[in-house]
């Protein structure tokens, strides 16, 4: 069966450090993968999209990698700030739908 | 910047009642979606809608659910006879021609008693 697994439910790091979140998937062949941020009680907000033929994508302090051989994406936040505290979701497109991982709750402590 | 809006923000209903959740997507979007998120759980895909018909639906989207876009602006999700387990946050989303990035609304929190 198809699965999307995000490495941990929660990740706590110190302000200024780099946060690294993992998304692994099985039985998918996605054309692209996305990362979203979700704050409590709010809808997901798009952050980055990476296509299957791209190895890495950057946007300001965010970096995403995509390894279709390992079936894994890594999401990095450099120079993390308390305002980065949120749940981060990876999402895969599968035909006409999008399936989300369970998310990793990131807490950045000052 | 245009936003997806959803009404109501909260709805409380009795088990067995019908509910209609409403969404106004961004005006130039062509693809529309409903998701639900049970408290503390992951965001789950329900249905996608394009060109006035359902293009994909999940195993959650059974005969109790229906969607329509009656007037070219509103996009609605109807639950015919609500069950306790339908209690969740329901998110509407839309995307443009690229069908890639989805823009989510703020959600409707549904509580079935």
Image (cartoon, coloured by chain):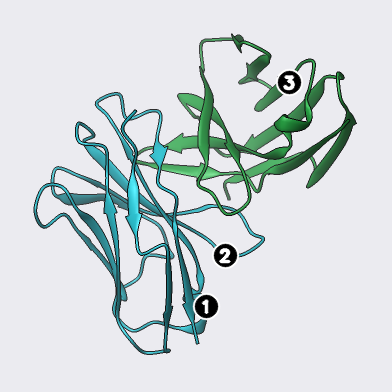
Chain colours: A green, B cyan
Q: Nearer the viewer, residue A80 or A67?
A: A80
What residue would you read off at disc 2? B38
> Is residue B71 found left or right of A23 in the rendered image?
left
Mark nearest the camera among 3 and 1 is: 3
Q: Nearer the viewer, residue A53 or B86?
A: B86
Q: CA distance from mark 2 to mark 1?
A: 9 Å
What residue would you read off at disc 1? B85
| Residue appearing at x 62%, y 46% in the figure | A3
Q: Secondary structure at mark 3?
A: strand
**Can you give x and y, in whole percent of width and height, for residue B40 in the image?**
67, 61
Residue B39 in sight: yes
In this rendering, the answer to whether B6 lies above or below A63 is below
| Residue appearing at x 77%, y 16% in the figure | A78
**Quarter the C terminus of chain A occupies:** top right
Are the residues tagged 2 and 1 within 8 Å (C-beta)?
A: yes
Q: Secondary structure at mark 1?
A: helix
């Amino acid at each position: 069966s198809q699965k999307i697994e995000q490495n941990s439910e929660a990740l706590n790091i110190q302000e200024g450090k780099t946060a690294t979140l993992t998304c692994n998937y099985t039985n998918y062949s996605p054309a692209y993968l996305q990362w979203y941020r979700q704050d409590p009680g709010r809808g997901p907000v798009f952050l980055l999209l990476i296509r299957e033929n791209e190895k890495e994508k950057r946007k300001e302090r965010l970096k995403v990698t995509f390894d279709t051989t390992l079936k894994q994406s890594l999401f990095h936040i450099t120079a993390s700030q308390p305002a980065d505290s949120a749940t981060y979701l990876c999402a895969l497109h599968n035909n006409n739908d999008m399936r989300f991982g369970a998310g990793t709750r990131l807490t950045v402590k000052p | 910047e245009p936003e997806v809006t959803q009404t109501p923000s909260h709805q409380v209903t009795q088990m067995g009642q019908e509910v209609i959740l409403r969404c106004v997507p961004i005006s130039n979007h062509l693809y529309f979606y409903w998701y639900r998120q049970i408290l503390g759980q992951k965001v789950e895909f329900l249905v996608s809608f394009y060109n006035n018909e359902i293009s994909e639906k999940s195993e959650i989207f059974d005969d109790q659910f229906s969607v329509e876009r009656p007037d070219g602006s509103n996009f609605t999700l109807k639950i015919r006879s609500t069950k306790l387990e339908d209690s969740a946050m329901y998110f509407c989303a839309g995307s443009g021609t690229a069908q890639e990035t989805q823009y989510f609304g703020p959600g409707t929190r549904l509580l079935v008693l």
